[in-house]
Amino acid sequence: MKIAILITSALLSLNVFAAKLEVAVKGMTCGMCVESITKELKATDKAENITVSLENQNARFEEVKGKKISDSEIKAAIKKAGYEAVKIFRK
C-alpha cells in the first residue's frame, strides 16, 4: 500500500498525469461564444482536449502535460474572450 502511494506521488510530481479541469462560465449565449472561449484557452498553450458547452455553461479541458495552468490564466483567457469564469474545478 505504501509503495503504491509513493509511486502515485512520484508520478504526480513529475506531472505524468494531466489535470482535468471544469470551469463554470457566465455570459455565453451562442455558438460564437463557444468558439471564442475555445480559441482563447488554446492560445494559452496549456490546455488541450477542450470542450465548451453552451447548454451546460462550462468549459472542460486537460492541462498539457508538463504545463500547469493557473486559475488566473484560465480567468484571463475566458475574460479575453468576453466572458467570466465563475468557478474552477480541478480533478
Image: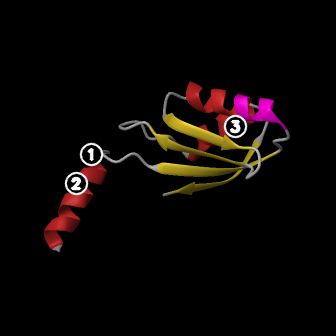
Secondary element under disc 2, as helix, strand or loop, is helix
Seen in the picture, residue 33 relative to 17 is either above or below; the reply is above
Kindly identify the residue that appears in the image at 17 percent across and 74 percent down. Answer: 1
* Amino acid carrying mark 1 in the image: Leu
- Decide: marks 2, 1 in contact (CB < 8 A)? yes
Sort mark 1 into few (<14), some (14-19) or many (20+) by Cα contacts within 10 Å: few
Q: Is residue 63 left or right of residue 35?
A: left
Q: Position of residue 11 (x, y in %)?
A: 25, 51
Q: Which residues are magenta?
A: 30-35
- Disc 2 marks a residue whose amino acid type is Ala
Residue density around tag 2, few if under 14, some if 14–19, many if 20 or more, within 10 Å? few
Residue highlighted by disc 1: 14
Residue at the left extreme of this rendering: 3
Residue of label 3:
78
Residue sitting at 59 percent across and 51 percent down?
Answer: 22
Contact between marks 2 and 3 (CB within 8 A): the answer is: no
- As drawn, 30 above or below 23: above
Is residue 59 placed above or below 48 in the rendered structure?
A: below
Quadrant of res 2: bottom left
Rate crowding at label 3 as few (under 14), some (14 to 19) or many (20 or more) other CA atoms within 10 Å: many
- Find the distance from the CA under tag 2 to the CA under tag 1: 6 Å
Q: Position of residue 76 (x, y in %)?
A: 66, 36
**Quadrant in the picture for residue 80:** top right
Q: Secondary structure at mark 3?
A: helix
